[in-house]
Image (tube, helix red, strand yellow):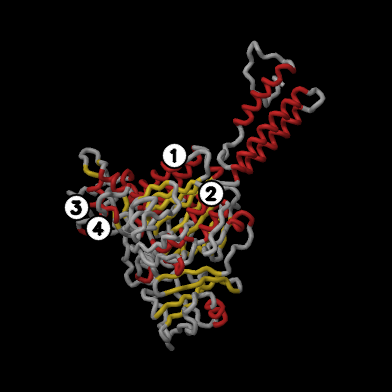
């Protein structure tokens, strides 16, 4: 027993190789064996009973085999260790940690893996996202339930479609106070610690967190967060009134600069107020300089530090879910001098279907030096994304360092897209692909590797997916579904079609005869549109597109009445019930 390679004992004058001292050896052996078992949630009644039972059986079995020369000690130990590893792995892996990284206004094709555009190649580099896609599942047609910050975050939190989520527009505190969130269900049903940090957009005009105390006179609204580090968006932080949220407080209390120091808040405000000099440059006396506006006070970097802090302070004996809400790459597209220089020298494609090819030109093209902060241009949208890729990688590296990565599921997604000047449109809110479709990549324990799924899914189902991994059940009024069976077993995803909508339009995306179609229904005309869109008929604009062959919505389909009727049935009640497909005038 003493010389057995699996048993680590500390010899002393009191230790002898006799059966009478076997209990000492067994106790020492059992202690070291149990130390090697992965940590589990001791507060969980099932896990605790199982762990105590395993320890008791281990003790008795080891004493018996050690004191009985007729028994196969080595075989018994090996079997016992194998059983211990199997049982504890099941306990630990049944509740993985989960990390959702949300980028604000991130369009589907700016992911570093979609190199072509109608106006030229896209030289974006996002190596961490690309490596994550190889480790897991990449969805190339992920649609959002509503392309606007407040509503889409409310859809995710509530597990409901746009028309049911209760938040139809930004800057209105109309969250139904009795409405549950998937965060709360994971916390209460599955005993998860649930964290949030950054720009969550759940309540744009309320900064009391995680309880919201000024919603319609209600004392508090419990969204389900165990802990949170909430901060405002890029420019919004400069428009706050005291008491400030975390990022503004940090800026107010910090100084930046090398030779001369300045208030971090004053520097930040001057930068985000925009250049005051000609052709997109800051004046020579501006505080917005390379040595002052650095990653130290950059909003996305701040959120990454907050995320690591939440993980570092999490309980070691409980699983956790965390949603990290980065403010970027949402406008204003602002880069530090270092970020701007990192994308300099690359040619960025101009907007498609636009008479203004100079839209979103890079400051470098206008003669602004690389050694100062930059604002505007597709290059700075790219600079933000490449910086965010680095920040997401930093969180991954931290999880690796603290040995949590093997039990952590990570998903990266955009809350909605960004038109970037295509069809002469900036921002989102419209039913075109760059507004409603976003990157989505998930990887981690149990998720299949190297899968690229090209049919439509909805980001609404991330809520159901995380609940499924946690063992929580959605409420009956939630419409979110789970992608877990597809990601772990390769089964068919749960929906025949996905939906999106906002204000005066609704749409569905569905595969018919191996072709992915999008049917858009607008009350009146759709507003800002591609130049090829035909006019409304009878007060409605009904448009059909092939989403894979026509990624920029330039070729509306007029000769597929059967497909139109099939998709029309899946529009919300009252939308384009009898409308005719819009056609070009002959």
Identify the disc placed on residue 283: 3
Most extreme residue toward the top is: 13
Asked if residue 190 is positioned above or below residue 278 in the image, the reply reads above
Q: CA distance from mark 3 to mark 4?
A: 10 Å
Q: Label 2: which residue?
A: 409
Asked if residue 176 is positioned above or below residue 185 in the image, the reply reads below
| Disc number lying in front (4 or 1) | 1
Q: CA distance from mark 4 to mark 1?
A: 42 Å
Q: Label 4: which residue?
A: 280
Assign a secondary structure to mark 2: strand
Of mark 3 and mark 1, the one earlier in the sequence is 3
Q: Looking at the picture, how far across and down is residue 349, in whole percent?
A: 39, 63
Of mark 2 and mark 4, the one earlier in the sequence is 4
Which image quadrant for residue 361? bottom left
For this rendering, which residue is in front, 228 or 585? 228
Q: Is residue 553 visible?
A: yes
Q: Is residue 434 visible?
A: no
Q: Residue at x 35, y 69 (%)?
A: 425
Q: CA distance from mark 3 to mark 1?
A: 43 Å
Identify the disc placed on residue 313: 1
């Amino acid at each position: 027993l003493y010389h057995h390679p699996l048993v680590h004992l500390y010899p002393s004058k009191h230790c002898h190789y006799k059966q009478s001292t076997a209990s000492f050896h067994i106790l020492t052996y059992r202690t070291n064996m149990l130390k090697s078992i992965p940590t589990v949630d001791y507060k969980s009644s099932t896990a605790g009973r199982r762990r105590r039972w395993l320890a008791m059986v281990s003790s008795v079995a080891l004493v018996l085999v050690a004191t009985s020369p007729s028994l196969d000690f080595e075989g018994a130990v090996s079997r016992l260790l194998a059983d211990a590893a199997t049982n504890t792995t099941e306990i630990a892996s049944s509740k993985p940690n989960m990390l959702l990284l949300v980028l604000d206004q991130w369009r589907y094709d700016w992911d570093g893996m979609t190199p072509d555009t109608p106006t030229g190649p896209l030289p974006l580099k996002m190596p961490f996202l690309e490596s994550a896609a190889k480790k897991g599942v990449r969805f190339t047609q992920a649609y959002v339930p509503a392309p606007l910050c407040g509503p889409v975050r409310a859809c995710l939190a509530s597990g409901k479609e746009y028309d049911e989520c209760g938040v139809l527009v930004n800057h209105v505190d109309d969250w139904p106070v009795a409405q549950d969130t998937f965060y709360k269900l994971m916390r209460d049903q599955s005993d998860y610690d649930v964290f949030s940090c950054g720009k969550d957009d759940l309540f744009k005009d309320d900064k009391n967190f995680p309880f919201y105390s000024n919603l319609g006179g209600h004392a508090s609204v419990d969204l389900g967060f165990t802990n949170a580090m909430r901060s405002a968006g890029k420019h919004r932080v400069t428009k706050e009134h005291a008491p400030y949220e975390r990022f503004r407080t940090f800026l107010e209390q910090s100084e930046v600069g090398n030779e001369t120091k300045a208030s971090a808040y004053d520097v930040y405000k001057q930068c985000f107020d925009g250049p005051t000099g000609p052709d997109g440059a800051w004046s020579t006396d501006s505080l917005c300089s390379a040595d002052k506006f650095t990653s130290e006070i950059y909003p996305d970097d701040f959120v990454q530090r907050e995320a690591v802090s939440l993980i570092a302070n999490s309980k070691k004996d409980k699983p956790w879910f965390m949603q990290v809400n980065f403010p970027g790459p949402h406008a204003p597209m602002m880069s530090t001098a270092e970020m701007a220089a990192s994308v300099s020298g690359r040619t960025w494609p101009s907007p498609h279907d636009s008479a203004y090819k100079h839209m979103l030109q890079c400051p470098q093209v206008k003669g602004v030096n690389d050694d100062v902060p930059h604002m505007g241009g597709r290059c700075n949208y790219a600079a933000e994304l490449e910086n965010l890729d680095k920040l997401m990688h930093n969180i991954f590296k931290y999880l690796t360092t603290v040995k949590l990565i093997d039990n952590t599921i990570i998903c990266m997604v955009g809350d909605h897209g960004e038109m970037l000047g295509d069809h002469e449109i900036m921002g989102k809110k419209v039913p075109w692909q760059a507004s409603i479709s976003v990157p989505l990549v998930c990887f981690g324990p149990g998720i299949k590797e190297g899968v690229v799924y090209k049919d439509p899914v909805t980001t609404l189902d991330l809520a159901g997916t995380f609940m499924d991994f946690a063992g929580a059940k959605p409420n009956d009024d939630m419409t979110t579904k789970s992608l877990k069976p597809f990601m772990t077993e390769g089964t068919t995803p749960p929906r025949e079609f996905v939906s999106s909508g906002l204000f005066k339009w609704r749409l569905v995306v569905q595969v018919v005869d191996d072709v992915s179609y999008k049917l858009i229904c607008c009350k009146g005309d759709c507003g800002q549109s591609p130049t090829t869109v035909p006019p409304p008929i009878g007060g409605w604009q009904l448009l059909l597109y092939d989403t894979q062959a026509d990624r920029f919505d330039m070729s509306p389909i007029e000769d597929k009445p059967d497909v139109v009727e099939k998709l029309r049935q899946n529009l919300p009640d009252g939308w384009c019930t009898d409308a005719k497909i819009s056609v070009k005038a002959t």
